Image: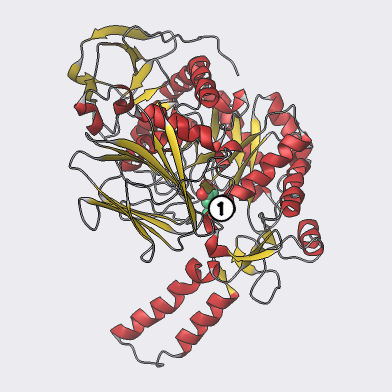
Amino acid sequence: MSSVKKYTYGEPFFTEAVVKEIERSAGDPAEFIVDKKARTFIYKLDPSTVCYGLGETVRGMNKRGWLYISNNTDEPHHEEGKNSLYASQNFLLIWSKKELFGIFIDYPGRLSFDIGYTETDTLTITFDDLDADVYIIRGESAEDIVKTFRGLIGKSYIPPKWAFGYGQSRWGYKSADDIREVAREYKKAGIPLDMIYLDIDYMEAYKDFTTNKETFPHFKEFVKEMADEGIHLIPIIDAGVKVEKGYEIYEEGIKGDYFCKDELGKPFTAAVWPGAVHFPDFFKEDTRKWFGDKYSKLVEMGIEGFWNDMNEPAIFYSDKGVKEAKKKLAAIPEKELTFENCGAYRDALSTLDDTYRDYHSFYHDVNGKKVRHDKIHNLYGYNMTRSAGEAFQRNYPDKKILMFSRSSYTGMHRYGGVWTGDNASWWSHLALNIAQMPALNMCGFLYCGADLGGFNDNTTEDLMLRWIAFGMFTPLMRNHSALGTRVQELYRFKNKETFANFIKLRHAFIPYIYDEFIKAAENDTMYFRPLSFVYSDDERTFEIEDQLLVGDSIMIAPVYKQNARGRMVYLPEDMKLLRFRGVEDYDVEEMKAGDHYVRAELNEVLVFVRHGRKFEIDDNSHI
Ligand code: MIG
């Protein structure tokens, strides 16, 4: 039997994360010591307590032992020391030998989860403002609790089936010819390719919903040309709208009063890629409708998928920031080359992109009420993506459009998926990718994936091979990298044949992957599960963060260490190991429960089939 209790504090903002009416319980949740003055919820952690959840964050699956802050941030360095990434999912599963429950905190402002960080045996949740709905979910098992939570927040977004193919992306494809070259080289190498992503370079001066007439001429025909090659083009859309007289979106935004305002009631201005931009106020229904309808400009040219970026929103700097920096610079004594002055120069400029200041200086119009951005900050990307999702449902009710976003909050999972942003070409980020997937799934985000091969820094061929061997199980399978880094299209490497085999394997796995994905979406279950969710009687499984159950039938144990030719794998039950080198080239081995050192060469993909389950592949699968 599962149960949900809802406790309301202060005046919660209506986030629309929860779609189910739950009656309000009186008092405080018995699980926590609530200190309203300090705005904290405190829970004593048992030595056996494991905490799962929080969506896409740094570190491992068990969130115990670190400080996580829900504060959506354009954070391009996903190091262990970071507290916030792009998204906030305030769902935590607390699981010890003594008890098991979930907590969801529906609060769009800054919220911190000190999970045994300050004091190893204490979980302290601290709110900026105690205006929140707090849900306590109980159930018989972790899966039961997740299912109940998912029932509260509504069904997950389902992308078109072709979006389960393989996509190539890179920041810096400058022209249609660059894109053609990618398509051609993939073909030449015999590596299947289903999508090419268009990063900001396809636009004219980084203006949303424009296409560059010089570098991407005859865009509609170009989209068709690629479609004829079996390739979907997926353009990026950024949150900020360029301030430019005569630019349709800007003019309409001003006329329709669709932008966020500053203290004085003028459209708030900040600098991002296009230079000065205004941010659409996605909390207004008419803004959402207006902006969402603009995606049709590209849909009418044959586009069937998008990725929403910079929607935390990311801000490079603002007028206020520049003024502050100038003032600080002016105060530094001239000509004195001292260590202190060096620090002062640095400090003056480093506060240029102080988003804390900027998020406190613009406002939204929520049903006629002025709400300062920081109070509802974590909802911005959600509402941008919602604006698109609502428009797609309205304008193309019979069509499925691919949509995923960088920033998110619970509720956005109904409108799109997510990618995990600017990771790096590091082995540790392949491990991070593994740990992040089930955490996202718990919170309703099923269509997700990371930049395969790594975004920042230079990749290596072996990292790419291992990452693709894992990425072929993630619903969103995209190779993406940053401008200036080593090129990493699969045809650039020596082992083209292996890469071709891997992508063909992905295709052959799609019937399984897609079925399991749809099952998870329809039944509010998880596509990726930690082992402990299924084998909770086996204590060992709580410590395994580098193996995952994928759907109901299989387990994977990716290799994520350089120069490793295998790894230790823990089998909680007898399983059958399928060792794939290609769609038709695989061995089968029966394996007993327990610890094993399992060889896995760079050209192999290992699938462990659970006892009594089936894993069928389709060697003729096309999408
Ligand atoms: O400031 O559009 O996370 O995927 O390639 C960087 C350029 C802006 C950040 C995204 C990344 C994308 C990049 N964008």
The residue nearer to you, when weighing 43 against 514, is: 43
Let me know if residue 211 appears in the view: no
Taking 492 as reference, is 218 left or right? right
Is 204 or 541 nearer to us in this picture? Answer: 541
Q: Position of residue 536 (x, y in %)?
A: 27, 25
In this view of the protein, can residue 420 be seen by the observer?
Answer: yes
Q: Where residue 500 appears, x then y in whole percent?
A: 47, 21
**Amino acid type shown at disc 1:** Leu
Check the picture and name the quadrant holding the C terminus: top right
Residue 73: where, in percent of width, then height? 47, 57
User: Which residue appears at 34% of the width and 27% of the height?
Assistant: 141
Residue 53: percent from left, percent from top: 38, 40
The quadrant where residue 603 appears: top left
Q: Which corner quadrant holds the N terminus?
A: top left
Residue drawn where x is 21% and y is 56% of the image: 119
Q: Residue furthest front?
A: 26
Camera-side residue: 298 or 320?
320
